[in-house]
Amino acid sequence: MKQFLFAAVFSTATLLAQTSAGDAANGKKLFLRDGCFQCHGYAGQGGAAGARIAAIGLNAQGLIRYVRAPGGAMPAFTDKVISDRELTDVWAYLQTMPKAKPAKDIPLLQQLQK
Amino acid sequence: MARSKKISVDRRGFLKGAAAGAAALVAKPEAAKAQEAAEVHRPATPNPLPGAKQTAAETAPPPPRVDVWTTDRPGSDFMVDVIKTLGFEYVAANPGSAFRGIHESLINYGGNKAPELLTCCHEESSVAMAHGYFKIEGKPMMVMAHGTVGLQHASMAIYNAYADRVPIYLLLGNIQDGAWRRSDVEWAHSVQDAASMVRDYTKWDDSPVSLGGFAESAIRAYKIAMTPPMEPVVIVADAVLQEEPLPEADRRLQIPKLTLATPPAGDYGAVKQAAKMLVEAENPVIVAGRVARTPAGIDLLIQLAETLQAPVIDRHFRMNFPTAHPLYGAGSIGSADVVLGLEVPDMWFATHSQTPVNRMGMESKRITKPGAKVITVFAGDLYGKSNYQDFGRYDEVDLAIAADAQATLPLLIDECRKLITSDRKAALQQRGVKLAEVSRKNRERDIEQAAWGWDASPVSTARMAAELWNQIKTEDWSLVSDLTFVSNWPGRLWDFDKSYHFIGGHGAYGVGYGAPAAVGAALANKKHGRISVNIQCDGDLNYAPGVLWTAAHHRIPMLNIMHNNRAYHQELMYVEDMAARARRGVERAWIGTAITDPNIDYAMMAKAYGMFSEGPIDNPNDLGPAIKRAIEVVKKGEPAMIDVVTQPR
């Protein structure tokens, strides 16, 4: 039990230290290496297989929490598969993804709006 | 049965034929001609006197009759007479010796018209073409195949059609009599019970042993195939019956009259009960599976939804309901107090959610509200088989009406209308206004979502769908492919409202269906001058790409847009899923699933098969102009392909 608590406290402390930063360049490598794009798209735009994650509203800690215990069909990615540090880098990369333009500024989409 | 029949012909006719045959034989290649020329220059030698045998052969009167192996009326001609009464436009086949007799009769005796023979490069393509054709035309295409190797090729496509409630009319060739088989090849290509291989996923089959039996079984098979639930059927045409002369006694064979059975409508009492539940419900939801068998089915579903002011959740197995209708997708099963499932083969999945639990199985949860009632109208309740599990999980429902939904809708609509008072009607109208607003917001959300990744490379499937729509929206168009693998973007952005705007999916999700089904559907669209659009998955095309040649050869106009995500992507995600759940790195999931190194050049592939093509295109700004150029080709009556390197989904 003591060991578990120590691990939990240590993990939380580590997590907090990491949430404020992240290496976006490494995050991009991980995003491609670990196939995040397969479900969420290269642009993080999402689709039938995964939610949009570009410009994600979660902070790094929120992303880590979700990836460790996701909902729906997404499998849990444990820290054995991808570490908190690496997920923080992925989070940083997601922040660099461009936001979508409003549909009204894209002629093909604007004409679909009725 | 009697065999080794011979036809006696007049001796003079025989000699005339023999002379013609000899003339054909002496049409020699150049080497033989050179040898003959050399012989002309040899020194002349005196002719020897003819022997007694030769003299007798030349001077004796010919025998009055001689037996030869020809006939002017093979049994296969009669088979073609039978086939023609069924009104097939086309017969799809990869040629096979076991049905060579019918093949010859179709093109010569039958004039290669009604049905016209379509040259296919794989039996899986033949069946899937018939599958797609039916979903536009509403009537079957005939398919011919070997009873053994051809049927083995065809079997997955038959299973798809079976699961998709599509009638395929399969005519198998087989050489039942061992003495008739010409070689070891024909022994290997013969079978005792040809249809047994696919009996688990066909509705009916027969192996008639006489031409009279063939006629009756052929008509019966058509009737059975076309009675809901519609399914594939198999008739085995024995080669001896095909190739032997039609006996004099059989020349007065009758072809039975075809009368299709009326589709089964729901029991009156049960339909009244359903109407009462639906009219009294505060939030009824209609779930549409394979409701619309004909264009009238769409109109009926609109009438029911508008009568009840109930939202329609479309499972996209058919073109059921207009996507721009204010009741389209405007509700959720989770908020419903009454759920009406119309021809929904997977009602359990419609009413439950599932979450994988590591590798331990699935955690399932009913998503309907406590106390919500479920009504089903499903022709599948009238008929089923046990081995293949396409029937899905058993669902607990409150009222199960075993009937064809489209045939039941008129009565259900009438009963609902009878029960709706003026007060109730006003309340329903208010509900309709709210639902229309939900539908409008859904549409807005989809359009905004489409903007994400708009300029990305590879091209997003949303951008691809929007570029396509921009080019076809003013045309008479038909989407001849599924929505599943492109995140349903056409369904979210385009206005589907005609019966031929959409053909649904595979049925059993057997990959390899997409390309040939699209070609078959485009063929059905051809005579109407429609622009057929096929969003073609790369993995699917690689099963039997020869169907591109069939499209080019038969001048089937269609626009193929490659959804080239360079992977068997669903499986890639599954391997990633397994690796994550096994707490291993997921970076190797591409092994065995990616279609890269080398990348396949689909534009070059299409060109090799004789089709106009462009690509690969990975810059989204290049896509619109390329589609425009391809559509010009399609409008001239030819197929075209644009290879688009796309996002995974």
Image (tube, rainbow, N blue to C red):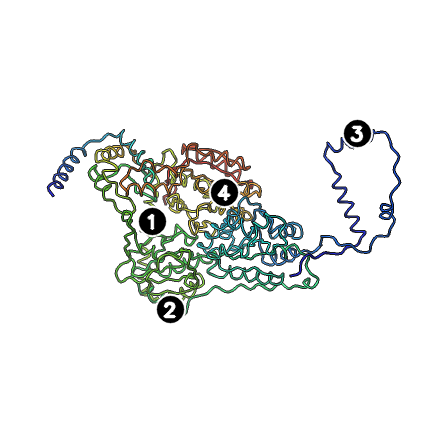
Q: Which chain does the numbered disc 4 sit on?
A: B
Residue A51 is tagged as: none
Q: Residues within 10 Å of mark 3 (few under 14, many from 20)?
A: few
Residue B84 located left or right of residue B316: right
Give the mark nearest the N terminus, 1 or 2.
2
Q: Which chain does the numbered disc 1 sit on?
A: B
Q: Nearer the viewer, residue B635 or B132?
A: B132
Considering the numbered disc 1 on the image, is that residue within a helix, a strand or a loop?
Answer: helix
Question: Depth-wise, is mark 1 or mark 3 nearer the camera?
Answer: 3
> In the rendered image, which residue does mark 1 sit on?
B440
What kind of residue is marked 3? Ala
Q: Nearer the viewer, residue B264 or B105?
A: B105
> In the rendered image, which residue does mark 2 sit on?
B272
Alpha carbons under labels 2 and 3: distance apart: 95 Å
Alpha carbons under labels 1 and 4: distance apart: 41 Å
Considering the numbered disc 4 on the image, is that residue within a helix, a strand or a loop?
Answer: loop
Considering the numbered disc 3 on the image, is that residue within a helix, a strand or a loop?
Answer: helix
What kind of residue is marked 1? Arg
Whether residue B479 appears in this view of the structure is no
Alpha carbons under labels 1 and 3: distance apart: 89 Å
What kind of residue is marked 2? Lys
Give the mark nearest the N terminus, 1 or 3.
3
